[in-house]
Image: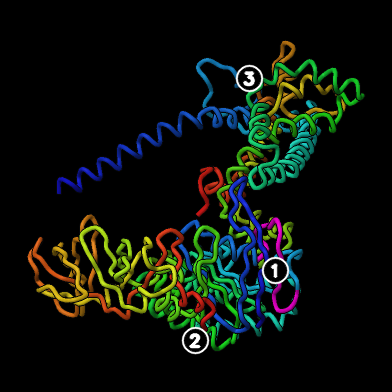
Amino acid sequence: MISSFGAILLRGVRAASVMVILFLFLCPVLWMLITAIKPPGQWLNSPPVFWPSHIYLANFREALVRWSGFKGLLDSLAVASGATALSLLVGVFAAYSLGRFRTGGENLSFAILGVLFMPPVAVAVPMYLFWRTFGLLDSFTALILQYTVFNVPFISWVLKGFFEDIDLSLEESALVNGATRWQAFLHIAVPLALPAIVAVALLSFIFSWNEFFFAVILTRARVTTLPVILPTLMEGHDIRWGSIAAIATIAAVPVIALAFALQRYLVRGLSFGVLR
Amino acid sequence: MAEVSLRGIRKSYGAVPLFDGFDLEVRDGELLCLLGPSGSGKTTLIRVIAGLEAIAAGRIVIGGRDVTALEPRHRRIGMTFQGYALYPHLPVRRNLSYPLEVRGVARAEIERRVNATAALLGIEGLLDRRIRQISGGEQQRVAIGRAIVQEPDLYLLDEPISNLDASLREAVRGELRRLQRTLTATMVMVTHDQMDALAVADRIAVLHRGRLQQIGTPAALYGRPATLFVAGFIGRLRMNFLAGRLGEDGVLRGEGFALPLPAKIAALPGAAEQEIVAGFRPEVVEVLSADAPGAIPVRAAGELFHGEQTIAFFRLGPDLVQALSAAPIGLPMGAAAWLRPAPEALHVFDRETGRRLADNLATEETS
């Protein structure tokens, strides 16, 4: 009796703590969603308006059209997808090469990791001058390449460990079984590392999607990603909090949707552990 | 089916040479075991045959084709790895079919060969399972199946039995042997377990530190070991060794014993006044309670009861000597006893070189 009462109590306490923690994390998201559907005049009241008097979807129209949120969405998608694809292309091969062939001796992989430790601010001005020299300021090319530079060290470092954990004899058996080196990589190593590849792809996408600092420095009007649009809404006297919340919602949805779609892989990939 | 010839293989790891002009011949349709302790180079050797290890010099010929410069996939070999190396992301069926798929074999032919192989190995029921869902013994069958399905010229098996439970091993030895006969295949099998080798091999090649110690039938290796190393390595119970000096009178004198050797051995050229080692197996020792000609005095040092037989230990100077007895002997610890090895079953080795003395050396190529 006592033990079952204790078990119920424990379960109750656990559920309560989970709810408190979830509330803390989700509260800002909830507030963003609510603000996005509030009509003007209910955004910054005291006491706050917890539920709008009516659902006001014009915020979204305003965000997408007047504040060019639609262009921002498309530009962000283009930059993040482009950077992720390119980063994977370089990073997966780099990781495999570092992990399997000791490419560059013991030091190259550490040198690559070093790029991760470097504060982005340190290279902001040189990179600005660099892209200006090539006439690539305010271009997709510059932003995609810039993000690739940041993503590749992360991807190659994480995946290197994954490839090293794959038993070499699996690929050797493929070689004996008739595969070329390339086929052994494609048929054996890549599928086995797939959860990790998906996980780092998603993290690269999120980084590129959210990146603000370099986007502000390297782009103007031709390329405008969502993080760059948001602060422009806060200029002037009449701050459109409803539109800001709407555009933030629009920015959040693709990443969340992607994470849900890839859930199956993430559970295994994000543990960054040994494949079993 | 093919014979294999290795000629003058050279390979080193960094500055450490492993093979320095290694030769080996595998006959068509035989099961050859490469036997040796870890670090002896046996696994490296089949990896060399498979093309997974580069060699500095030498020639590898399989079935009359010089494969030295060929990639592994062109050598027509079927290989199993120590951990089986099955693909965990593919079901059993795809594991079996992978070698055929990657070589572009027609789908109907793949289907036929996979089914035939599965039937041969009795794994038809496992074809749709994942590797993780089948037992170690079943994984071993799938690994062998993946080699068979390719209909290779040569099979290379790296420790195929070692990972299995003791209860399975005896059955798998028999099965492997029958399979090899059914396929009339040339097989090279690596093992560190001499009992596996003795049980299944047509011939055994004993390796030690990258050198071929002896190659011959299991009976030849057991009956006439060519070196001290082989003598100590082959046999379920380790051979007993007595080191000493052979006098003109044909008596081997060492620490705490004097053992008269049969005249035939004492008369071997180069034997007299030499430091030699006499070896005898625990299987051929009589335990006596009183001194007798040809016996050496020892003290009882315990015994292990194994059911149908008992292994008794005796102290001889600083060394332990074993004797196998059908029934428990029951001597108290430290009790005096005499051991008499059967004179015709004595092996004599040069202490310096470790080589078997005289004529028996000529039996290296017994078969």
For label 2, the SS is helix
| Residue that carries the numbered disc 1 in the rendered image | B60
| Residue that carries the numbered disc 2 in the rendered image | B178
Magenta part of the protein: which range?
B50-65
Q: Residue at x 58, y 30 (%)?
A: A34
| Residue that carries the numbered disc 3 in the rendered image | A41
Say whether residue B348 is left or right of residue B154.
Answer: left
Q: Kindly report which numbered mark, 1 or 2, lies closer to the viewer in this rendering.
A: 1
Residue placed most toward the observer, A53 or A169: A169
For label 3, the SS is loop
Q: Rounded to the nearest whole Å, what is the CA distance between mark 1 and mark 2?
A: 28 Å
Residue placed most toward the observer, A251 or B286: B286
Picture layout, residue A16 above or below residue B68: above
> Is residue B251 part of the magenta span, yes or no?
no
Q: What residue type is labelled 3?
A: Gly
Q: Residue A204 appears at what percent x and percent y?
A: 67, 37
Q: Which chain carries label 3?
A: A
Say if labels 1 and 2 share a chain.
yes
Residue placed most toward the observer, B51 or A35: B51
Q: Residue B80 appears at what percent x and percent y?
A: 56, 69
